[in-house]
Amino acid sequence: MSKRKFVTLALLVIVVTGAVWWYAYLKLHQTELEISERDIAEKIGLIGKVAITILYDNNPYDQRLKTAWGFSCLIDTMETKILFDTGRDSNILLGNIAKLGIDVRGIQIVVLSHIHEDHVGGLFGILEKNSYVKVYVPLSFTDSFKLRVKQYGCEIVDVGEAANICEGVATTGELGIGIKEQSLIVNTWKGLVVITGCAHPGIVNIVRKAKQLIGEVIYLVIGGFHLGGASEDEISSIIEQLKSLGVAEVAPCHCTGDLARRMFEEAFGENYVEAGVGRIIDIQQPPYDLTISISATISSDANRPKLRDEFHTNSDSLNLNGNI
Ligand SMILES: [Zn+2]
Ligand SMILES: [Zn+2]
C-alpha cells in the first residue's frame, strides 16, 4: 500500500469513528431528554379550578383599566398565584392590579417569558411591593438582570429545559434560536391551557411542544401570537396547523396583530375568546370528582378521565366568563 493510500484510509477511519461517536452521543442525550420530559407529564398534576386574568395588554377589554403595549397575566390555581410577565410600566401594571382588587403580596411565583422590555419592565415595581417570590427566567437572561432580581432577596430559577413549576403548571423550557422564550402550560381538567408572551419561537412550535410534553388535548391558547407582520397566507397556514394540533379555543392578544385576530375570530367562531386587559378566563370546578377520576385513570391505563373529552366536546361546559 502506498503512503498516500494509507493516509487516505487512516483519515477515513478517523472520520467514520468520529461520526459514530457523535451519533451515539446525540442518541444518549436524546434519551436523557425524553426521560426527563416524560417525568413532566407524570408529575404535573391536574387542576380543577383556575382563573387567568389579563393584567396588562394593548387591547382594551375592561374599560376601567389602562391599555399599554406589553403583556402580563395572573394565573390563580387556588393554591398558587403566578404572575406571568409584567408589562413594560410598573405603574400601569400596579394600577390595573389595584383596580381589579388583587393583592400583589399574594403572588408567590413570577415567570418571565423573554427579555423584551414590554414583558419584564414592570418586574421591579412588583418586587418593591412583594419580594417574597420565586422568579423563573430563561437561562439566557443576562447576569446583570439576574443580579438585580437577587438584590431584592428573591430566589431566581434559571429555566433551560421544560420543567414543572407547581401543581398543574409547567414551563415549556427555553425555546427558539433567536429570542429565547418560555411559555406556560396549565394542565386543567378541560385540557391544556398554553400561555405565551410574544411567541417568538413560533406559536405552532410552542403548542406542539406543550402537546409533546403532556400529551393532552389543547383546550386554550392565550397570549401574544406574534403575527403583526404576517401575511394572510401565513396566518391561514398557522390557523390550520393549530387546528390540526387539536387547539379548541384561542384568545390571541398583545402582538398577535389586528389582521390575525380577525382571521382567528372568523376561523374559530364561538371558540374565539376576545382577549384584552381585564379579561378573566375562569375555569370552574369539574362536575365530577377529580380524585376518583384520576385514580380511575391510573388503573385503566388511560391518560386522563374519559369524562374530560366528553365535556370538552360539549361547548356548554366551556366556561369562559368575562368580568363585565
Ligand atoms: Zn418580544
Ligand atoms: Zn411583546
Image (spheres, helix red, strand yellow):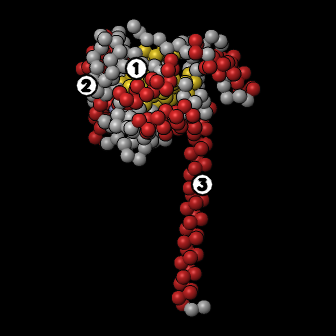
CA separation in Å, label 1 and label 3: 42 Å
Decide if residue 269 is on the left or right side of residue 120.
right
Residue assigned mark 2? 89
Disc 1 and disc 2 in contact, CB within 8 angstroms: no
Can residue 257 be seen at all in this image of the molecule?
yes
Residue 36 at x, y percent in the picture: 57, 41
Q: Earlier in the sequence, mark 2 or mark 3?
A: 3
Image-quadrant location for residue 306: top right
Circle 1 packing at 10 Å, graded few (<14), some (14-19), many (20+), is: many
Dot 2 falls on a residue whose secondary structure is: loop
Q: Identify which residue, 279 or 136, lies in the foreground.
A: 279
Decide if residue 114 is on the left or right side of residue 251.
left
Q: Amino acid at mark 2?
A: Asp
Above or below, 178 against 105 in this view is: below
The answer to whether the beta carbon of the residue marked 3 is less than 8 Å from any atom of ligand 1 is: no
Residue 4 at x, y percent in the picture: 53, 88
Q: Which is in the foreground here, disc 1 or disc 3?
A: 1
Dot 1 falls on a residue whose secondary structure is: loop
Residue assigned mark 3? 27
CA separation in Å, label 1 and label 2: 20 Å
